Amino acid sequence: MAKVGLQLYTVREELEQDFEGTLRKVVELGYKGVEFHTFFGRSAKDVKALLDELKLEVVGTHVPYTRLLDHLDEEIAYHKELGNKYLIVPYLTDEQRQWDELFSNLNRIGEKVKEQGLILAYHNHDFEMTEKINDRPVFDAIYDEVPADLLQVEMDTCWVYYGGYDPVEYIGRYRGRLPIIHLKDMARDEQQKAVTVELGQGEVQLQAITDAAIQAGVDWIVVEQDFSSNPPIESIETSFKWLQHYAAEGGNIHV
């Protein structure tokens, strides 16, 4: 049964102001796990103690690509102490999109991460769908060039959709290599650019995506809202209520 987590980037300002209080609120709302993007200078020991107290699982951590390149040993040590097994590449700047170099680096980083008993994963945006290598989306090229035992998929289903592809088809394509999905919804502004909204408030076919993810055996369905026009705590509560409704209608998720 898939569990529901939150990417804490969604509540980044609240977390920076009140780290402990924000995590307590996330637990109160019903989330079973959290995915980090930063620890605001806290030690792994202190963060783990708080998570243990709250009975909150670590889904994974978004680790900047430059940290994985230049400070990998330090990151591995921190996350082993924290009890987190997924180190996730969160985003590539324009300058970092040198694809042959990226493939080589991901293979090398993945080997070292695997040797230490951890797992490297990659989180997409829309550019991996719209940019092509030999007429194939970069998304697919990455996973062609780096084997599954060195790189797992953290699929942001909203960005797959916004990039012009069917998230349900992509979930099926990467079944068995897909421990985590990001579930988010979006509307469009006057320029047709994506605007992230609470689950159920936009145009993404969330039920079909969630059904497909569960059928594919994902461990975690992670809520993320890049930007929120409402107070972020209110937004994550609204999104969690959508998942509660989904579960009440027979969806096989743990809420």
Image: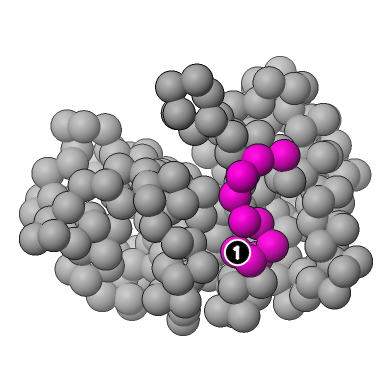
| Colour treatment of the image | one colour
How crowded pointer 1 is (Cα within 10 Å; few <14, some 14-19, many 20+) is rated as many
Q: Residue at the spot x=82%, y=40% of the render?
A: 238
Q: Residue at the spot x=76%, y=38% of the render?
A: 236
Q: Is residue 208 magenta?
A: yes
Q: Secondary structure at mark 1?
A: helix
Say if 200 sits above or below 153 in the image.
above
Which residue is more in the foreground, 244 or 218? 244
Q: Residue at the spot x=23%, y=55% of the render?
A: 138
Q: Can I make out residue 19 in this image?
A: yes
Q: State the residue position of label 1.
A: 209
Which residue is more in the foreground, 126 or 31? 126
x, y percent for residue 103: 16, 58
Which residue is more in the foreground, 188 or 223? 188
Say if 216 sits above or below 167 in the image.
below
Q: Is residue 251 left or right of residue 119?
A: right
**Which segment did they paint magenta?**
201-210
Q: Residue at the spot x=73%, y=59% of the render?
A: 4
x, y percent for residue 225: 62, 37
